[in-house]
Image (cartoon, rainbow, N blue to C red):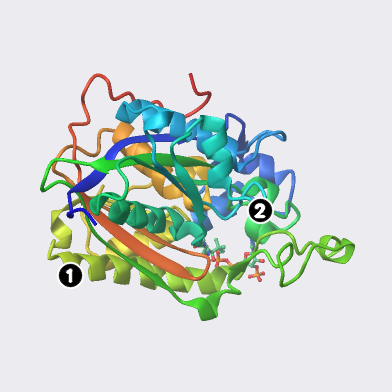
Amino acid sequence: MKGIRSVGITGVGSYAPEKVLTNFDLEKMVDTTDEWIVSRSGIRERHIASEEKSTSDLACDASIRAMKDAGVKPEDIDLIIMATVSPDKIVPSTACIVQGKLGCVNAGAFDVMAGCTGFIYALSVARQMVATGSNNTVLVIGADLLSKLTDWEDRNTCVLFGDGGGAAIVQPVEEGYGLIDHIVGAKGLGHLCIEIPAGGTFMPATHKSIDDRQHYIKMLGKEVFKFAVKTIEKTTVELAEKTGIPIDKIKLIVPHQANSRIMDAGKKRLKLADGVMYSNLEKYGNTSAGTIPLALADALADGKINKGDYVMLVGFGAGLTNGAIIMKWAYEVNQPEKRYAVRGAVQ
Ligand code: UT7
């Protein structure tokens, strides 16, 4: 094994489909109101993929932008780690489909399923792979296309989710910069809190499972809410203590975007200054493994991050899982070649 080296994100890209579904559109579909959705979740609109698209398409569009941002070509990528809960198919991995579509002929590829924490899990694996010298250029993706797995008759869930995702290129960086440390955790006894019951070996797909709508996302919202509020605080504090980086030195916390009340509670419990807890939730809703890289890309585009800033990503979600990763941002963001186009069609 080669020596440990500094590893960081060297490019970021994101993608959300062009079609927007607003809360007012939802008022016409289920018994809900814009007022309820905004006050209970903070979401105003979400992006919805067109019928012919699958998760790998969103992942590819985000990855093309990330590669362009980092100045790498598909053949430079030597590993693809894809975090998703909405794979194109049960078999094979969506990472392999992405590898084929992008022409990353020199890359190994595998999926990580860790709910909405998936991007953090994937990034932490990439960190180790590059630090040890096993890989040099890893494409890490977090993307979900939940609109095809959402029960559009269930107002408890359908108002919350959206489609989209992001990608990051992970490479060796200047010493003293980049990914510093991470923690990942799970509480498997909570696996029923967010699930898609049918379609796997537990409940293979049958006419009955479909009639019973068991192939759609089910969520015990209140249980998850309580877990999330505790977790966002606990995980942030745990990683800050582990690394010795005080919370007030962190420039930006990019949390999983599930609910503005969860983020507000985190901000209050952690006594954060205004603007530290980043949110773009109102524009995208909850895109599961997609939210963190999508928010990171928007934060970069908004000029919230620059070289040397401490940035922490914090996640929680199905599993139940939690995790956080902290980095010292490794490059000047205002370089002319760094173009943070984050929405719409990929040029
Ligand atoms: O990404 C994975 C992590 N996921 C999360 O972090 C989600 C965590 N949970 C949440 O964000 C919140 O629990 C929700 C936004 C899902 C729900 O908020 P809540 O304050 O926990 O509402 P509730 O489930 O307690 O529902 C309150 C009321 C209920 O009516 P009753 O029983 O009080 O008469 C619901 O039936 O609101 C009703 N309700 C709705 N009303 C209008 C539920 N969904 C809707 C809706 N529109 N869409």
- At x 53%, y 52%, the residue is 84
Q: Amino acid at mark 1?
A: Glu
Q: At 85% from the left edge and 63% from the top edge, which residue is drawn?
A: 206
Q: Which element is circle 1 on?
A: helix
Residue 295's image quarter?
Answer: top left
Callout 2 secondary element: loop
Q: Which residue in the structure is indicated by mark 1?
A: 241
Report the front residue among 148 and 133: 133
Residue 39 pos. (x, y %):
51, 55
In the image, farthest residue toward the bottom: 189
Q: Is residue 106 visible?
A: yes
> Label 2 near label 1: C-beta < 8 Å?
no
What residue lies at 49% left-to-right and 40% top-to-bottom? 283
| Residue 123 horizontal/vertical position (percent) | 36, 52
The residue beneath circle 2 is: 91
Q: Amino acid at mark 2?
A: Val
Name above or below for residue 62 compared with residue 337: below
